[in-house]
Amino acid sequence: MKNIFWSIVLLLSLVACQTMTFDEEEINPTEQNGTEQRGTKEMHFHCAGFKSTYLEETEDATKASSTQEYTDHIILAIYDKDGNQVGNAIKQDKGDPNITYGTFSYTLEYGKYTILAIGWNGEQQCLITSLENISFSENWVPQMFICRQNIVVSESYSNQRTMTLKRCVATWVLNCTDKNIPQEASVFKFRFTNAGNTLNSETLCCPKTQEFERKVVSEGNLSSPLRITAHCFLPQESGTINVKVSVYDKSENIIAEREITDIPMRINCRTISSGNLFPIGEANGNVTFETEYTEDINHSF
């Protein structure tokens, strides 16, 4: 009898533990007493800030920052439980006097949804083919922040949602230390390999690596040190990429070309490649991996 008693106690304990581990979203809140509840609710989504963890030159950006500070545009897209987009995505532009930048309202039927918010800077358009395929026009990768949330809309569910967007790009800076930079240098082309220009919102990585090119046109006289910033998506949290740098004059005549290989990169971090670019020839430099970690990675090219 004693063994039977303790067996029953153990069984009840196991049942109690299993009950405590139920995820709230596993229980359908749109059903009560076995009856499906139908209705709609106006939801309000607030992009309250942007979370960045690498150090900017003039500030510690480890804390959430204003929506106005890092982006020119924010887009909000909503998907149902089957991954189908609900309605049209809503895009906001900073400076529009008719909106509260970073605040969205949308009336949804009761049910499960995935909310996707993306903030970026620049003039390129954000192209959302699906939750697994996000890109930008002109094959561009801008400074980009993202937040993805799963929600369940019901009668008892709060209609206020705060979204903090996180940087999802790896940033590369070309720090050209040549004392004399040719003034005819006008166009800089960067060809990336081992990286990508599309993003999966769930993994925050590119679905596949592919070569892509970024073109930067100089708008004035160049002086040393010359710094040009570019962004890319990585196939995993960290890895190495290669960048071929080509410099042209206004007539597309090549002035200099360098292949910089095995550049250490990490999502939400900035790598600075320093060295001589002009003229073509031998040059030594180093890469400093700037992040919240106190770690330097030295690299010659």
Image (cartoon, grey):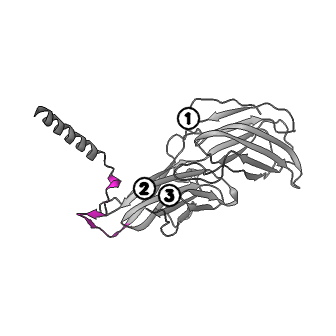
The x and y percentages for residue 13 are 22, 39
Q: Position of residue 25 (x, y in %)?
A: 35, 54
Which one is nearer the viewer's eye here, 240 or 170? Answer: 240
Which residue shows up at 43% across the image and 66% down it?
Answer: 106
The numbered disc on residue 150 is 2
Residue at the disc numbered 3: 116
Magenta part of the chain: 24-41
Q: Position of residue 154 (x, y in %)?
A: 33, 63
In the visual, does 282 lie left or right of 89? right
Circle 2: residue type: Asn
> Measuring 87% from the left and 38% from the top, which residue is drawn there?
280
Q: Gap in Å between the C-alphas at discs 2 and 1?
A: 28 Å
First in sequence: mark 2 vs mark 1: 2
Determine which of the numbered discs, if any, sits on residue 292 in the image.
1
- Mark 1 surroundings within 10 Å by alpha-carbon count, few (fewer than 14), some (14 through 19), many (20 or more): some
Q: Residue at x 63, y 39 (%)?
A: 239
Residue 147, above or below 269: below
Q: Is residue 233 magenta?
A: no
Disc 1 residue type?
Glu
- SS at circle 3: strand
